[in-house]
Amino acid sequence: MPGKDVDLVVIGAGLSGCALVAALRRRGWCGTIQILEAGRGPGGRCATRRRRDDLLWRLDHGSPTLSFQAEPSGQLRELITSLENRGVVRVDHDPVVGLDHHGDVVEAPDHPLLRGPRWRGIPTMATVVEALLADGGKDVDACFGERVQTLSRVEESWVFPGGLRAERLVLSGTLLAHPRSLAMLGWQDVPLRQAVPHGHDPVLDEALAWIAGLNATIRWNLMLEFPAVDLDPFPRQIWLTPQAQQQFGVERLVLQRQQQGRLGLVLHGLDDGALITPKTQPHLLTVQQQRLLSVLPELLRPWPSLQRLASSAHSLGVMRWGAAQPLDQGMSKALQWCNQARVGFCGDWIAGSGFGMAEGALQSSIDLAELIAP
Ligand SMILES: Cc1cc2nc3c(=O)[nH]c(=O)nc-3n(C[C@H](O)[C@H](O)[C@H](O)COP(=O)(O)OP(=O)(O)OC[C@H]3O[C@@H](n4cnc5c(N)ncnc54)[C@H](O)[C@@H]3O)c2cc1C
């Protein structure tokens, strides 16, 4: 990590982290920003999987779209329009169908992610975060492959191993603030709690208490390569009805055309609650891959040309997604910026329209930018 002083460190280059950078610049804030991201590139849950053995391959293995509850307005509308005008996103009209527990095609089930308008990254979802990051300009430095494990504050500054110091800190995920990281990563204490003792910032104390109560949702996404196949009509998403989800342990299938007519397919697998630790994860990934491959032929029954190819589909492995997902309401916006400790939060888990989805991630960043740069 670079040894330097910056005005702001943002942990996480997902949709909200990158949107924060863009929103700060739109407000004319010209401070220096260092982004620290655990992944190999920007994107987080809106990332696109590439392959070393196939340079043309692009698969949106997390979120396939930016979903909104309703038509965006205000600054959110301005952001989407700016992305549309630059050709970064387009409205997603691609067919979404439902699949019931008999394995029959039905209308897509009612789900918050499908109710309102949706936008899609062009050509992939990663393009969206890349564009937002680029809006930050030259005073944004992004460091990838950098998983922050500890946080500390020294004389009113945030200090990182290697000598990086920052006046302000923003966490775009909850990993460093949530007790679930302790079991999952074998940590002793919640890093943000270690850095700021109880009582120093009452807003932070309240935020940490709220975050501790947040549930984590896990998805096991199996990525598959299919040879060229004719599919007409071509469903972009196949959503299982609630009963079918229970039966198959799968939320949906997402299809994405590749070069030379090939097809990328992502099975969004549901979690069964097994304890995930650094020790159990490799085994769980294998178990989930086998489980998802075994239900695939049944799920593809309404698409015989695809079903015939199921056994020859090439597995590109399973991606485990973990996210704190508020079911009823997100964390209050009043807790988004903790002024005493100079730490803030953005992400799809903050209250507001569209929390738990891309809309919420974007809106939370617009809101936080207003607090940092009033
Ligand atoms: C399988 C799946 C399907 C989805 N489908 C849809 C959909 O159809 N429509 C929709 O609108 N939304 C969907 N979503 C939700 C959508 O992806 C999220 O709302 C959005 O991407 C959240 O962005 P974020 O920046 O808040 O979080 P994230 O994308 O999780 O970003 C957080 C970033 O922080 C990084 N990070 C975390 N901790 C550390 C650390 N300690 N050190 C360094 N880096 C760290 C992570 O690597 C990550 O890149 C889906 C999500 C998943 C997982």
Image: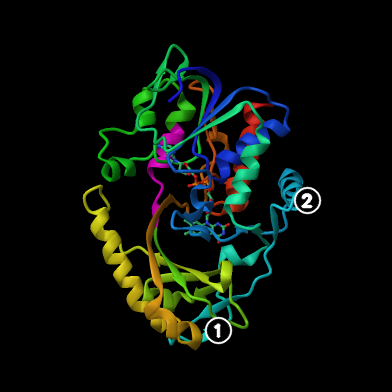
Q: In this orientation, which residue lies closer to the viewer: 39 or 77?
A: 39
Percent position (x, y) of residue 201?
Answer: 46, 23
In this picture, is 242 found above or below 371? below
Residue type for callout 1: Val
Quarter location, residue 208 = top left
Camera-side mark, 2 or 1: 2
Q: In the image, residue 89 lies at what x, y percent?
A: 69, 55
Identify the residue at horizontal 60%, vertical 67% (top origin): 114
**Residue pointed to by mark 2:** 85
Looking at the picture, the colour scheme in use is rainbow
Q: In this view, which residue lies farthest toward the top?
A: 155
The amino acid marked with disc number 2 is: Asn
Residue 168 is situated, as x and y percent measured from the top left of the image, at 53, 23
Q: Is residue 302 visible?
A: no
The quadrant in which the C terminus is found is top right
Question: Which picture quadrant has residue 210?
Answer: top left
Q: Is residue 29 left or right of residue 252?
A: right
* 66 with respect to 54 (left or right): right
Badge 2 or badge 1: first in the primary sequence:
2
What residue would you read off at disc 1?
106
Q: Residue 292: horizontal and vertical position, in percent?
A: 35, 71
Badge 1 residue CB within 8 Å of ligand 1: no
**Left or right position of 369 against 213:** right
Q: Which residues are magenta?
A: 206-218
* Name of the residue lying farthest toward the left: 279
SS class, disc 2: helix
The CA span between labels 2 and 1 is: 35 Å
